[in-house]
Image (cartoon, rainbow, N blue to C red):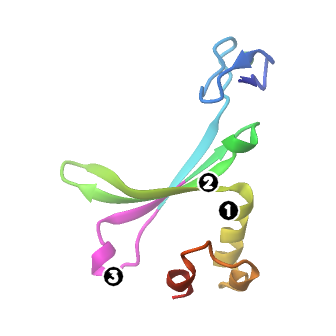
Amino acid sequence: MAECSACGRPRETVWRYCPWCGTAQRVKLVDFFRPHPLLESDRAKALRVSRYFGDAEDERQVRLSIWHELEGDRAQADAAISLDVGEAARLAGFLANGGDTAAERPPPAGLGSSAAG
Ligand SMILES: [Zn+2]
């Protein structure tokens, strides 16, 4: 149970709006990123990045998901992962700095050999 950021009344953390005053509790920004244009295997895919803002630590996250197009103007997620704010900032630095931060932290256990490639 959390408190509404506007009126202070209790609310469930999964609710997007306060049931008492109607204030939005969970703000989300979404953007899509196209695949490399020369890689045929990724042609019908997209990376969706959803950034969640909120008062509680578990509400603030960045969710990355890979989607592929289906017939009929539909899409389906193939995989998804949520990063906390610190890991999302580290990812942003990795992309912005050409990978200079890659050696700052070892890969998660079991992913060392695949992450190195
Ligand atoms: Zn409220």
Residue at the disc numbered 1: 88
The CA span between labels 1 and 3 is 26 Å
Label 1 or label 2, whichever comes before in sequence order: 2
Name the mark nearer the viewer: 3 or 2. Answer: 2
Give the vertical position of 3 relative to 70 (above or below): above
Q: Is residue 46 magenta?
A: yes
Give the vertical position of 35 relative to 86 (above or below): below
Residue at the disc numbered 2: 62
The local crowd at label 2, few if under 14, some if 14 to 19, many if 20 or more residues have their Cα within 10 Å, is: many
- As drawn, the residue found furthest toward the left would be 71
Residue at the disc numbered 3: 39
Question: Where residue 73 sits in the image (x, y, percent)?
Answer: 24, 49
The CA span between labels 1 and 2 is 6 Å
Q: Is residue 82 magenta?
A: no
> Which quarter is ligand 1 in?
top right
Local secondary structure at mark 1:
helix
Question: Where residue 91 sits in the image (x, y, percent)?
Answer: 66, 70
Local secondary structure at mark 3:
loop
Q: Are marks 1 and 2 in contact (CB under 8 Å)?
A: yes
The amino acid at mark 2 is Val
Local secondary structure at mark 2:
strand
